[in-house]
Amino acid sequence: MPLEPATSVGEVPPVTSSSPRQPAPSIDEARAAAAGGAGKRAYVREMFGEIAPSYDLLNHLLSANIDRGWRRKAIAELDWQRRPDGRYVDLCAGTLDVAVQLAATSGFRGHVVAADFAEPMLRAGDRKREGQPISPVVADALELPMADGSAAGAIVGFGVRNLADLDAGLREVHRVLEPGARFVILELSRPRSAVVRGGYQLYFQHLLPFVGRLVSGHRSAYSYLPDSVAHFPTGDALAERLHGAGFATVRWRPVTFGIAAIHTAIKSA
Ligand SMILES: C[S@@+](CC[C@H](N)C(=O)[O-])C[C@H]1O[C@@H](n2cnc3c(N)ncnc32)[C@H](O)[C@@H]1O
């Protein structure tokens, strides 16, 4: 069945400043959200809406561009060659980096539905998709506007950690995938080696929040980032959750000393 997006970026009226601005969320609100509190969905949506203009710059700066190579490795796991003309979902698509990289891959003839609930993020990445088979859709990953079994594959870069209900999100992806399709998760992780972890913690807990706050002007977003990684199930724990959501085969591997990890889950044929 064809995809019926509730709204797409092109159809949504421009964001205006007519509604009074709320004060930026505090560090305490960010901590509670990172720990999975009741306000997580609202915090995450608002926060990404606010940092959208500086997201790309900070993303590449703070990761020294390593994130591009990670996305390439994740896309290689998607096995899109199984259905080169299929419809693929980029979940929590943000400024479209994963969608654009996938759509530009040589031999890919399919279509990418790029879903995100923070419209300013999709808008910030909109110019990147020029001429590419990508449809940005303002949608919650927990309630995708797609029919059962309608996607040839799904991928998410640095997104699942932000879901207010991880298990519901994994089940939702399983629902929209066709039998035999893959779901690839690229997510930040926690390095196992004590030496790497030491330097990484120093960078992640102190330098990154400082630079992030300075460049984005956002009080809590770059404190939420390390906190949310600390609370997220990594490695085997995430693999277990994927099994729990119905995926038959799950494997994962660390990348760059375990700073990030790629999980690949397959829906039974
Ligand atoms: C860290 S950004 C990642 C963006 C992009 N995938 C990348 O590789 O750079 C996380 C994105 O997930 C989105 N997000 C978080 N929770 C979501 C949800 N429940 N539904 C849809 N999008 C969500 C945020 O709005 C944000 O744009």
Image (spheres, rainbow, N blue to C red):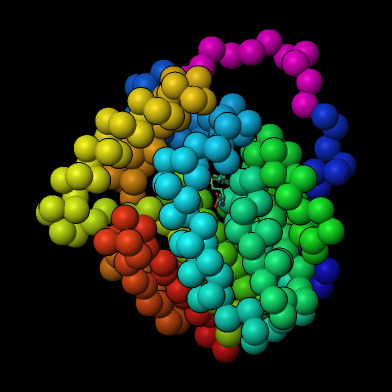
Front residue (pair 216, 185) = 216
Residue drawn where x is 66% and y is 51% of the image: 96
Q: How far across and down, in percent of the image, does residue 17 sit? A: 75, 16
The quarter in which the N terminus is drawn is bottom right
Residue stretch rendered in magenta on the structure: 15-25
Residue drawn where x is 31% and y is 55% of the image: 259
Residue drawn where x is 75% and y is 45% of the image: 126
**Does residue 257 appear in this view?**
yes
Residue drawn where x is 65% and y is 39% of the image: 121
Q: How far across and down, in percent of the image, does residue 217 sit? A: 50, 20
Front residue (pair 84, 19) = 84
Q: How far across and down, in percent of the image, does residue 147 sit? A: 73, 67
In the rendered structure, does residue 100 fall within the stretch colored magenta?
no
For residue 155, which quarter of the picture?
bottom right
The quarter in which the C terminus is drawn is bottom right
Compared with 105, 205 (above or below) is above
